[in-house]
Image: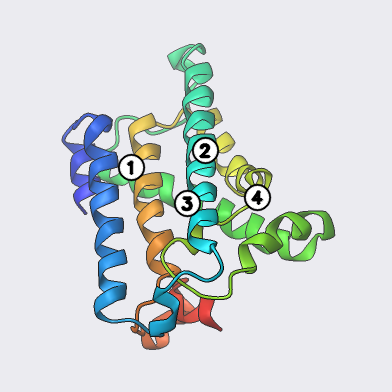
Amino acid sequence: LLMIWMASSAVSYWPFFPLVTLAAIAMVALLERVLPYERAWNRDHGGDTFRDVLHITVNQVLIQSSVALAFGLRDLLPESVTLWPRSAPMWMQVLLAGVVIDLGLYAMHRYSHLQPFLWRLHMLHHSPERLYWMNGGRRHPLSALILAGPSLTVLMVLGATPIAVAAWLAILSVHLCFQHSNLDYSLGPFRHLFCVAENHRW
């Protein structure tokens, strides 16, 4: 809600969105210490923490750079070409960007489990021996681009407002940490609707 409010209030992306994102991720990491599903998962397993930090860093730089490049190129096109509802309230644009991004991620994730070449790239994401907040970022860089590329391309072609896309990507960064967290929680029947840690542990 804070991300959507900031986007609607024309708050500058830098440094506010990254700061809020980091604060929320830190909260998830802290909650793991307070309410862990499995205490042993809060400890490093054979140097995996360092590897996961590298994966998160490389993939974040890659995705953010790709988004900046794509929308920089999109700005070269005339404004009249856009199909995006730029006059709609910003909260609606953020949610619409979220629908496009999540549908793209869902489709490409499923396809990554079915297509042998994509699975060879994606299987790295399923290799951890413990589930904790940094697992969401453990991806082959090419797999990260394949997962996010289609939906980001669609948004760019439609002429989506960059801050709407950036706000949803910030929300997604927090959610990735939450859905891979070592937190002892359950959404009950809603676990079939939302992709949460309970599903990932299974």
Q: Which callout, 1 or 2, points at the residue further toward the start of the chain?
A: 2
Which disc, if any, is residue 140?
A: 4
Toward the viewer: 29 or 42? 42
Looking at the rendered structure, the kind of residue marked 2 is Ile
Residue linked to disc 2: 63
Q: CA distance from mark 4 to mark 3?
A: 13 Å
Looking at the image, residue 161 sits to the left or right of residue 27; the answer is right
User: Is 31 drawn above or below residue 17 in the view shown?
Assistant: below
Discs 3/2, front = 3
**Crowding at mark 4 (Cα within 10 Å: few <14, some 14-19, many 20+):** some
Q: Position of residue 69 (x, y in %)?
A: 52, 23
Discs 3/1, front = 3
Looking at the rendered structure, the kind of residue marked 4 is His
Q: Which callout, 2 or 4, points at the residue further toward the start of the chain?
A: 2
**Pointer 1 with pointer 2, Cβ within 8 A:** no
Toward the viewer: 50 or 1? 50
Question: Residue at the spot x=55%, y=55% of the render?
Answer: 51
Q: CA distance from mark 1 to mark 2?
A: 14 Å
Question: Residue at the spot x=29%, y=40% of the render?
Answer: 18
Q: CA distance from mark 2 to mark 4?
A: 12 Å
